[in-house]
Image (cartoon, rainbow, N blue to C red):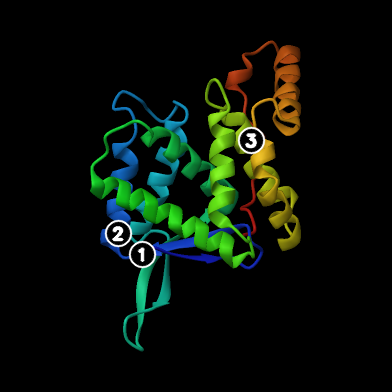
């Protein structure tokens, strides 16, 4: 069983489960990616990033938390803290990747279990309809004729984690996520134009650029 618990500042959530559930999710994430793709391809690289964190959690190299078991005795689960805004985007890409594919039930079950943890996290933040919000993000992802550049997703994630550190600000940003991701939307156009303008001045390919991430760890 996979569980979710939102962090104090709503920057992320603790994805936790036993080693078997986490390993099943990792395998399912890899199963939906093109066998010829690598970590530099989009959107597969977002899915691989998630799979990497899940594997580290499963191996016990991230966190351990106590959750309520079937009895009064708490159970220790392996866990990893994920950026909430990035996880919603990652799940939207997962939905796009599995559309039209014949995926074994064991994989679709694991992937939807991950989606259920995101819905649980949004519910903890007071979203009246978490599933509707996740669907809106997926619609925005699907609106692009090609996959949104990695720069855009990283930029949104960086703004969410580093530039908005209060819980109220982060919830507000999360509610605007479908608008930010929409093809031709104000945020997407402004972010990509800034990147392209900088690339033109430097004489480099804009696709090679990424946001300048702060050296410190984000405060979830």
Position of 13 relative to 193 (above/below)? below
Disc 1 versus disc 3: nearer the observer: 3
Residue 94 placement (x, y as % from top left): 42, 39
Q: Position of residue 11 (x, y in %)?
A: 63, 57
In depth, the one of 126 and 24 nearer the eye is 126
First in residue order: circle 1 vs circle 3: 1
Horizontal relation, residue 176 to residue 89: left or right: right
Residue on which disc 1 sits:
17
Residue sitting at x 70%, y 44%: 159
Local secondary structure at mark 3: helix
**Of pointers 2 and 3, the one earlier in the residue sequence:** 2
Q: Secondary structure at mark 1?
A: strand
Q: Are marks 1 and 2 in contact (CB under 8 Å)?
A: yes
For the residue pair 94 and 151, the one nearer the viewer reads as 94
Q: Is residue 5 visible?
A: yes
Marks 2/3: CA–CA distance? 30 Å
Label 3: how many Cα within 10 Å (few below 14, some 14–19, many 20+): many
Instruction: Say whether residue 20 is left or right of residue 91.
Output: left
The local crowd at label 2, few if under 14, some if 14 to 19, many if 20 or more residues have their Cα within 10 Å, is: some
At label 1, counting other C-alpha atoms closer than 10 Å, the crowd grade (few under 14, some 14-19, many 20 or more) is: many
Q: Quadrant of residue 15?
A: bottom left
Please tell me which residue is depicted at 41% across the width and 31% down the height of the picture.
Answer: 39
Residue picked out by circle 3: 181
**Marker count (numbered):** 3
Q: Is residue 75 left or right of residue 142?
A: left
Q: CA distance from mark 1 to mark 2?
A: 6 Å
The alpha-carbon separation of the residues under discs 1 and 3 comes to: 30 Å
Q: Which residue is mark 2?
A: 21
What residue is drawn where x is 58% and y is 59%? 122
């Amino acid at each position: 069983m996979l569980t979710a618990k939102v962090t104090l500042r709503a920057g992320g959530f603790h994805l936790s489960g036993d080693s078997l559930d986490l390993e099943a999710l990792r395998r399912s994430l890899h199963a939906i990616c093109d066998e010829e793709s690598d970590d530099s391809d989009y959107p597969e690289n977002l899915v691989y990033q998630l799979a990497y964190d899940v594997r580290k959690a499963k191996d016990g190299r991230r966190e351990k938390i106590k959750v309520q078991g079937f009895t009064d005795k708490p159970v220790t689960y392996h866990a990893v803290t994920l950026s909430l805004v990035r996880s919603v985007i990652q799940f939207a890409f997962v939905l796009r990747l599995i559309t039209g594919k014949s995926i074994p039930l064991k994989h679709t079950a694991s992937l939807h279990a991950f989606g259920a943890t995101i819905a649980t996290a949004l519910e903890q933040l007071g979203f009246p309809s978490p599933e509707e919000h996740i669907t809106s993000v997926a619609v925005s992802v699907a609106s692009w004729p090609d996959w949104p550049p990695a720069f855009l997703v990283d930029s949104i994630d960086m703004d969410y984690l580093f530039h908005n550190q209060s819980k109220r600000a982060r919830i507000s940003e999360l509610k605007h996520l479908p608008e930010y991701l929409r093809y031709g939307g104000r945020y997407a156009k402004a972010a990509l134009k800034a990147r392209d303008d900088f690339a033109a001045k430097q004489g480099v390919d804009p696709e090679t650029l990424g946001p300048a991430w702060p050296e410190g760890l984000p405060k979830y």
